[in-house]
DNA sequence: TATTGTTATACTCTATAACTATA
DNA sequence: TATAGTTATAGAGTATAACAATA
């Protein structure tokens, strides 16, 4: 057959566009980090919670969920597990009894330090192809993009549910009954 | 209370590590791209299929699934929809009747060009903070990381399911009955 | 027996509505 | 009435087993 006419998307685009490279490498980095968390038994969003509590304790679940772009309904389960492992404490807020105050336990703080070590090793592995000067260059460029795109420092936008709905169907109504009494029912 | 002792992960790490910045910006870029695909009604993996067929037609579903790291069972549904929209054709392979040959239809090729325009606009938007020289620098650094990490050019590693299994529970056995006769039952 | 396409099934994550207790 | 936490439920993505047709 004839020599294939190389359907390149543009000039000098071997390996994909820069935006594609960012998405590709970013997904790889996120997956590797999740793998490296294996020994801790924590998921990336749980690490986000521990980190947030590490330098801003006493937050309510709702405030934390908003800050981390996690749904409140999901936050419940994530905190349930962290509390069950003794890493996070739910304390009553005496001024507003609807709210919890979330705090890191000593063990939680210890775990957070361990996560920090994992994160540093992970960063080293991801950037291994570059020398110190190049890492600084890359970091500076990425910071400018992040700022220009309006990204919140330190908050990973968990892959918002976007694409699809092929047939354009509107969302259906749903049930829900709610049952259990809340925490401190006297 | 005393002044909080700023729990920074390391020196000069405002905004997170470089690996975190890559994950953050990468997720943002992927989400935005999925949004920009809205008018086409295509999902990112479907775009991957169209692109692959654009310069390597005649592939079987299985071979394509392997190349794009999509599960064969998912590939069925993705191709079902592309075929239903008249963008892709399933042709019988006369040499091995188990296989299909996947081909882009003229309309599929047209759609692929449209996607290319969307992708270029997307790339421009993501890199808007940088000038031409800086984009070249960034691209060169990213290509070196991608190569060092062993990433396949042009293939997005869709966010492999990694983290969690909090209780370390092993996977359960499952059923499955299978029914319908395959395509060309004479 | 092995492979391709397919279906069934299960688990996770995302997203929304509804409910309780409290303000 | 509004808000925080919670539960139920629906939908999409990921993953695996099982099956029919074919090799």
Image (cartoon, coloured by chain):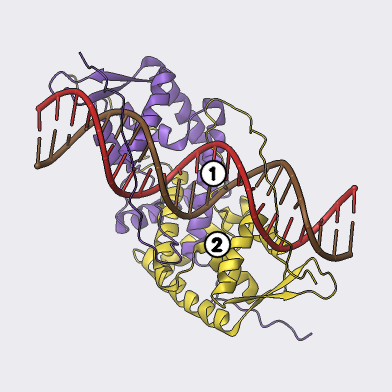
Chain colours: A purple, B yellow, C red, D brown
Question: How far apart are the alpha carbons under marks 2 and 1?
Answer: 18 Å
Q: Quadrant of residue A113?
A: top left
Q: Can see residue A80?
A: yes
In depth, the one of A99 and B163 nearer the eye is A99
Q: Quadrant of residue C7?
A: bottom right
User: Where is residue A4 shown, x and y percent of the image?
Assistant: 71, 81
Q: Quadrant of residue B79?
A: bottom right
Residue at the image point whose x is 30% and y is 47% from the top: A152
Say the numbered circle drawn on residue A31.
1
> Label 2, on which residue?
B45
Label 1 SS: helix
Residue at the image point whose x is 68% and y is 45% from the top: B176
Q: Mark 2 packing: few (<14 Cα in 10 Å), some, or many (20+)? A: some
In depth, the one of B89 and A151 nearer the eye is B89
Residue at the image point whose x is 39% and y is 45% from the top: A156
Please state if A50 lies on the left or on the right of A24 as rendered.
left
Label 2 SS: helix
The quadrant of the image that shows the C terminus of chain A is top left
Residue B76 against residue A53 in the figure, above or below: below
Please state if A138 lies on the left or on the right of C10 as rendered.
left
């Amino acid at each position: 057959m004839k020599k294939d006419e190389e359907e390149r998307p543009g000039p000098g685009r071997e390996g994909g566009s820069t935006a594609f490279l960012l998405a590709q490498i970013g997904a790889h980095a996120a997956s590797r980090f999740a793998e490296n968390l294996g020994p801790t038994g924590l998921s990336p969003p749980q690490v986000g919670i521990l980190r947030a509590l590490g330098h801003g304790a006493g937050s309510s679940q709702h405030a934390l969920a908003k800050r981390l772009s996690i749904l409140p309904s999901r936050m419940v389960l994530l905190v349930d597990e962290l509390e069950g492992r003794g890493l996070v404490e739910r304390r009553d807020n005496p001024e507003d009894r609807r709210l919890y105050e979330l705090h890191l336990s000593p063990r939680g703080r210890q775990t957070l330090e361990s996560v920090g070590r994992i994160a540093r090793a992970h960063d080293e592995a991801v950037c291994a192809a570059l020398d110190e000067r190049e890492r600084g260059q890359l970091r500076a460029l990425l910071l400018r993009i992040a700022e220009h795109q309006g990204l919140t420092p330190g908050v990973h936008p968990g892959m918002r549910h976007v694409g699809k709905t092929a047939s354009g169907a509107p969302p259906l109504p749903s049930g829900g009954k709610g049952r259990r009494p809340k925490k401190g029912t006297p």
